[in-house]
Amino acid sequence: ETGVTQTPRHLVMGMTNKKSLKCEQHLGHNAMYWYKQSAKKPLELMFVYNFKEQTENNSVPSRFSPECPNSSHLFLHLHTLQPEDSALYLCASSQHGGGYGYTFGSGTRLTVV
Amino acid sequence: GIQVEQSPPDLILQEGANSTLRCNFSDSVNNLQWFHQNPWGQLINLFYIPSGTKQNGRLSATTVATERYSLLYISSSQTTDSGVYFCAVEEVAGGGADGLTFGKGTHLIIQP
């Protein structure tokens, strides 16, 4: 374990379903991130939360909705997804100004059918 | 935004060989990390190295920030070293906590 825990590890959902991905960090960091990794594409930054405030939204479709209730927890709410949204979703945390880098979770592998 | 280029894109080596992976970036950075992605998708942090040289066992890394490149060295390769190696940076202009920008990775295959 890296100190960043993601659940579930695997998720299969239909296009009309609503589901949520959960991320929890146990490192005392103050910034959290969602990344998407599609097949044969580089990792794409989706959302940034710095001190629980969303500071970045890289033109992500509204069918992805992030939530950061506190500095230790981050959610990604999913609804009416498309098959092309199938990917590995990775959560990361860092300490702003800490100089120790980012720590990633194990990821949730999402399949939309 | 900042650009990150990694080379080579693919590398196939025999067990025991040494390798050098390169990462070029287009602007000043305050964070540079090397990751190894295992077959299950997890990103394992190898080095946090915005400048200087570090070593950890058979792996070492050097970042020359003034020339905007970093190198990852793997010596005496083992089959367990196989996987994708990513370089990721956080640019100075953003002020921090803006997210890492990743290169496309080097896919390393170590054959027994």
Image: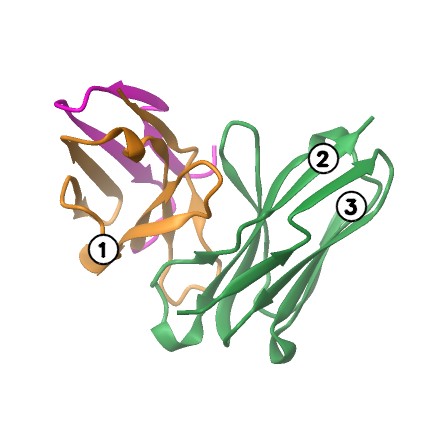
Chain colours: A orange, B green
Q: In the image, is residue A27 part of the stretch drawn in magenta? A: yes
Q: Are marks 3 and 1 in contact (CB under 8 Å)?
A: no
Marks 3 and 2, Cα distance to the nearest angstrom?
16 Å
Q: Secondary structure at mark 3?
A: loop
Residue carrying label 3: B58
Q: Amino acid at mark 1?
A: Ser
Q: Secondary structure at mark 2?
A: strand
The answer to which quarter of the image holds residue A35 is: top left
Instruction: Relative to B68, say whether A5 is above or below.
Output: above
At 49% across and 59% down in the image, what residue appears?
A: A100
Image side of residue A54 versus residue A98, left or right = left
Image side of residue B67 versus residue A81, left or right = right
Quadrant (top left/top right/bottom left/bottom right) for the C terminus of chain A: top left
Q: Amino acid at mark 3?
A: Arg
Viewer-closest of B53 and A82: A82
Residue carrying label 2: B109
Residue A59 badge: 1
